[in-house]
Image (tube, grey):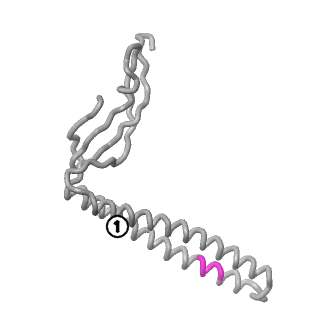
Amino acid sequence: MADGTLSIKRTITVRAVVTPRWKEDAERELSNAVAGSDAQLSQLEQEGQQLVDAIRSQSANPLDPRVQDQVASVQEQVAAKRAELEEQKRQLLEQQRQVRDLEMEQIVEQGQLESFTDVRVGDNLVEKLQVAVVVRDGVIEAIEGA
């Protein structure tokens, strides 16, 4: 800061131009994520049932209220996790629908990056912080606000 400049971190918005390749990639990623959610749901159900079976088999009296309470607790935990995973899957399916509805050449926000920039007295801070990169199939097409 001896020379009157200060280095600050800023967020850069990454915008993508919708192309056939971009759409295919986005749909494939979302399909893989949906399949992953399905696998997690299946595994959750299986592990939950195995745990319930283990609790019951380790007890001399499976109808004992304490055993029933343990089983109910496991089932509640499984149901809560199932609801969470189903909500994630629902969101992924909605994103998939949105991607399918995008028009070619439309620009969509794809994410954010961080970088540093130098500022000095007299700079417009808002302009320094408002930067975006536009990419087409992974290639930078424009840098806005730099």
Report the label total.
1
The quarter of the rendered structure image containing the N terminus is top left
Residue 76 rendering spot, x and y as whole percentages: 65, 73
Q: Nearer the viewer, residue 20 or 104?
A: 104
Q: Residues within 10 Å of mark 1 (few under 14, many from 20)?
A: some
In the image, residue 74 sits, relative to residue 129, either above or below, namely below
Provide the residue designation for mark 1: 31
Q: Residue at x 23, y 41 (%)?
A: 140
In magenta segment, residue 5: no
Horizontal side of residue 73 vs 39, given as left or right: right
In magenta segment, residue 50: yes
Residues shaded magenta: 48-52
Horizontal side of residue 131 vs 60, given as left or right: left
Q: Nearer the viewer, residue 54 or 75?
A: 75
Horizontal side of residue 138 vs 65, given as left or right: left
Q: Residue at x 43, y 19 (%)?
A: 6
Q: Residue at x 44, y 67 (%)?
A: 90
